[in-house]
Amino acid sequence: MPLCADDLRTIPERVFCQLREAIVEGEIPPGSRISEAELAARYGISRAPLREAISRLAAVGLIERRPNVGARVIELSAEQLIDIFHVRESLEGTAARQAAERMSAEAVDRLRETLDDHARRMQQEGGHAYFQEAGDVDFHYQIIKGTGNGHLIKLLCHDLYHLIRMYRCQFGMRSKRGPAALEEHRAIAAAIERRDGELAELLMRAHVRASRENVERILCGI
């Protein structure tokens, strides 16, 4: 999903992007009630564009509407997060295979440059924190976009993408899996560069599975 460039935003688009980031980064916590009056005052807008933004947030799964309760920020249970990881393992494995077959040489070069940047930033954070920003600076996003497969892009870059980012922001930085995850990313990128789709899929599946198992240890105590 594009990152809402300032010069392209309508008011509802701008508010949608601001609210989306506030939810993903935890500024508006999970389970929080959405008050139109409060948000309209905060962003200095009328209720109409705010309602449009809230409807879009509900469509991407970050807000849920409940009868007699109103709109609230989604609360993901441990079980729901694990379910998302199972879906990711299958779909992102397919994406890695297709990226190996379809990704341009220039896109592969950008992927490697991204990982070099991630390594530098992780070192600056003490060697463990490995948080990726949204959009084109996200390793997984680049691979998915590199497939050119509109169905995979919709499922992973629109329907699940910000739910996954929400997890990364609010839980992922607590993990010490940073160095291992970076090396797994490098191995996947190398397989894509060699155009070895089978290996790229196996490595991506193993990478997402390791992330899921880490989440299970953190959130489920297993």
Image: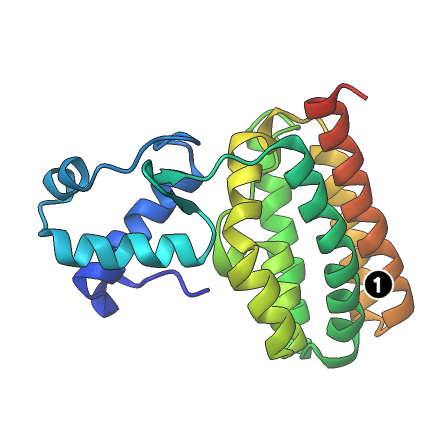
Residue beneath label 1, please?
200
- Nearer to the camera, 78 or 204: 78
Compared to residue 12, the image places residue 216 above or below, namely: above
Badge 1 local density, few (<14 within 10 Å), some, or many (20+)? many
**Residue 79: x percent and y percent?**
69, 35
**Residue 191: x percent and y percent?**
84, 64
Total labels: the figure holds 1
Residue at image x 65%, y 70%?
152
- SS state under label 1: helix
Residue at image x 9%, y 52%?
46
- Nearer to the camera, 67 or 109: 67
Residue at image x 65%, y 78%?
149
In the image: residue 178, left or right of residue 207: left
Q: Quadrant of the C terminus?
A: top right
**Residue 69: x percent and y percent?**
33, 36
Compared to residue 162, the image places residue 3 above or below, namely: below
Residue at image x 60%, y 30%?
129
Q: Which of the 4 image quarters holds residue 67?
A: top left
Give the amino acid type for the residue marked by disc 1 in the picture.
Ala
Q: Residue furthest top?
A: 221
- Nearer to the camera, 99 or 121: 99
